[in-house]
């Protein structure tokens, strides 16, 4: 892997060579067409090798021993922390907390910030397109605190209805929690605009970056969200590790969700004093090898270039929209490609999404079906389930063609007529 | 079709592609419930697609449990057709003695069912067994 300047277009064939899993041929000689990247992305060799290297050469628990391995582990973990800080444009490494994933990160803020700061009558503003991970924790903490969740509705094409923002974002709003990119519609949200308006009324903003962070550059300096979360496994890193970014003063004024080793400054039999962030929020043994290998994933992503990735994925997206729209009975949900990231969710008239996904699997095309952990969004869409194809840096034009061919195969199997 | 005939049919199918096509055929032939029967009471929980199961206890000596079940997904309808062959029209002790899991393994279908679909399928089996146990009454169970 030696992909140069971010301005040159990426070569997906070369990229594919870096991902061992993509080289295999499925039974019956079918190539693997992996289009479930919004659920989890595949891993480049450098990430797999980095994780192996940790276990084979210097593995030990973190922040415990004075021996050499302990020091190496600590050093490498802190290097990843700094890489994440740079990726997000955070002010300091201690604003970056290792968690088990985006879900854990959001739960930590809902419990740790919400329980302390939400008062009866306060409001949390969410959007109708949120993943359950950025909805249920707020719903539950609001119920507990006597606060209310309100929801920014969508326009008919599936973008946030900003005309409703003034009515919903008020002095009662303590926090706005929204996704940077819908995991179903692909809609890219105007986070900077929401941040500006939220800060005007004194509300904080939590960005759920699980979908958006892997697909384009972001900067907390330019777009000063107060909390941000993302997952390693969606940005080509190992599973089991994620990130919580919190502004330093907010982390200081927030309680830890998990308590135990490493997160304390002093423990007495009747009380404890917390350590400062990030340790305060990192109780117990962290996902050591995974967090270190996340650093390798971010290096890899940086070497390809997030802007080049975004451009490549946009081309795939435009092609997918064009070709899928021509299939009789196929309906795409969400805005046109100009307003979304690398996700296409659709239904096919006369085909249950489960049947469709299962038939696509028979052609080696891996997609997701169901409500994608967004039941309220699907209620809004008026369908119980959709089929979702989602793209990554290694997907190719030929794979879009394979998706289209597989849908025609499914149509024939299901006896659907034009 | 008997259970043995069903197993024979499946043995002739080379692989999952053929099995899946066969399930689609079975699903297309499945008797359809009227829309009015697709009520909350008849809905089987645990299925990713909607499944409705309408039972009928046929009096006689011995009584037999018949049912018609439908899904809105065609491959699930194929699996329902398999369950219908296994269970529908049998006596209550027969229903309670059938090991559906073992038969699905024998048909080679286990591996091709996602955990969610497996849960749904065995949710249906559970519903059928509960109906049979309830019809048999506490004395006999």
Image (cartoon, coloured by chain):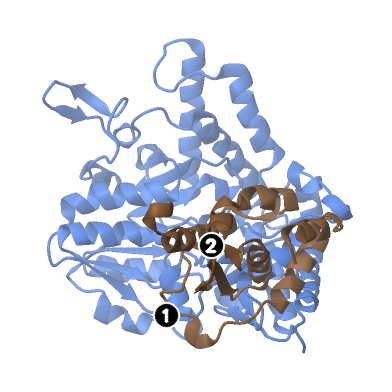
Chain colours: A blue, B brown
Secondary structure of the residue carrying numbered label 1 = loop
Disc number lying in front (2 or 1): 2
Q: How many numbered circles are shown? A: 2
Position of residue A51 measured from the top left corner of the image (x, y, whole percent): 61, 30
* Other residues around mark 1 within 10 Å, as few (<14) / some (14–19) / many (≥20): some
- Dot 2, crowdedness within 10 Å: few (<14), some or many (≥20)? many
Work out whether residue A282 can be spotted: yes
Q: Secondary structure at mark 2?
A: helix
Occupied quadrant, residue A192: bottom left
The correct choice, above or below, for A51 with respect to A61 in the image is: below
Q: Residue B86 placed where, x, y %? A: 65, 61
The residue marked by circle 2 belongs to what chain? B
A129 left or right of A338 in image: left
Reading the image, the residue beneath label 1 is: A154
Residue A98, given in percent of the width and then of the height, sits at: 42, 38
Labels 2 and 1 share a subunit: no
Q: Is residue A396 visible?
A: no
Report which residue position mark 2 lands on: B124
Disc ID at residue A196: none
Give A409 or A204, whichever is nearer the viewer.
A409
Q: Nearer the viewer, residue A248 or A323?
A: A323
Which residue reaches farthest top?
A67
On-image quarter of the N terminus of chain B: bottom right
């Amino acid at each position: 892997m030696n992909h140069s300047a971010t301005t040159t277009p990426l070569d997906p064939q070369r990229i594919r060579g870096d991902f061992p899993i993509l080289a295999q041929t499925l039974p019956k000689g079918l190539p693997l067409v992996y289009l479930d990247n919004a659920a989890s992305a595949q891993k480049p060799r450098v990430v797999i090798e980095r994780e192996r290297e940790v276990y084979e050469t210097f593995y030990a628990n973190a922040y415990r021993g004075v021996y050499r391995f302990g020091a190496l582990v600590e050093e490498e973990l802190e290097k990843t922390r700094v890489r994440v800080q740079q990726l997000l444009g955070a002010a300091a490494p201690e604003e970056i907390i290792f968690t088990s994933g985006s879900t854990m990160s959001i739960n930590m803020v809902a419990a740790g910030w919400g329980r302390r700061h939400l008062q009866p009558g306060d409001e949390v503003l969410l959007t109708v397109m949120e993943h359950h991970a950025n909805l249920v924790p707020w719903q539950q903490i609001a119920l507990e605190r006597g606060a209310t969740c309100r929801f920014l509705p969508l326009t008919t094409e599936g973008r946030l209805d900003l005309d409703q923002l003034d009515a919903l974002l008020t002095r009662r709003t303590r926090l706005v929690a929204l996704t940077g990119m819908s995991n179903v519609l692909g809609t890219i949200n105007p986070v900077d605009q929401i941040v500006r308006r939220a800060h005007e009324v004194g509300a904080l903003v939590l960005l759920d970056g699980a979908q958006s962070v892997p697909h384009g550059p972001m900067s907390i300096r330019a777009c000063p969200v107060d909390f941000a979360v993302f997952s390693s496994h969606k940005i080509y890193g190992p599973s089991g590790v994620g990130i919580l970014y919190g502004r330093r003063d907010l982390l200081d004024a927030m309680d830890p969700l998990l308590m135990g080793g490493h997160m304390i400054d002093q423990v007495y039999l009747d009380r404890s004093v917390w350590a400062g962030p990030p340790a305060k929020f990192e109780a117990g043994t962290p996902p050591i090898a995974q967090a270190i290998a996340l650093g390798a994933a971010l290096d890899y992503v940086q070497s390809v270039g997030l802007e080049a990735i975004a451009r490549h994925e946009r081309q795939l997206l435009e092609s997918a929209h064009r070709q899928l729209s021509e299939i009789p009975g196929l309906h795409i949900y969400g805005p046109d490609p100009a307003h979304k990231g690398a996700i296409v969710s659709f239904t096919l008239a006369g085909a249950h999404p489960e049947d469709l996904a299962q038939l696509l699997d028979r052609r080696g095309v891996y997609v997701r079906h169901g409500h994608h952990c967004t039941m309220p969004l699907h209620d809004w869409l008026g369908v119980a389930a959709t089929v979702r194809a989602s793209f990554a840096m290694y997907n190719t034009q030929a794979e879009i063609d394979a998706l289209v061919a597989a849908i025609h195969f499914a149509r024939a199997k299901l006896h659907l007529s034009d | 079709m008997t259970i043995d005939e069903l197993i024979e049919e499946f043995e002739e199918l080379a692989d999952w592609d053929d099995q899946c096509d066969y399930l689609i055929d079975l699903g297309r032939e499945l008797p359809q419930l009227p829309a009015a029967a697709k009520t909350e009471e008849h809905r089987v929980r645990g299925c990713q697609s909607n499944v409705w199961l309408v039972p009928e206890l046929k009096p006689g000596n011995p009584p037999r449990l018949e049912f018609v079940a439908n899904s809105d997904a065609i491959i699930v309808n194929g699996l329902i057709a398999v369950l219908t062959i296994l269970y529908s029209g049998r006596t209550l002790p027969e229903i309670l003695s059938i090991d559906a899991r073992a038969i699905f393994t024998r048909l080679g279908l286990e591996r091709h069912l996602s955990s969610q679909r497996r849960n749904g399928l065995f949710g249906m089996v559970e519903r059928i067994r509960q109906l049979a146990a309830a019809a048999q009454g506490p004395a006999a169970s």
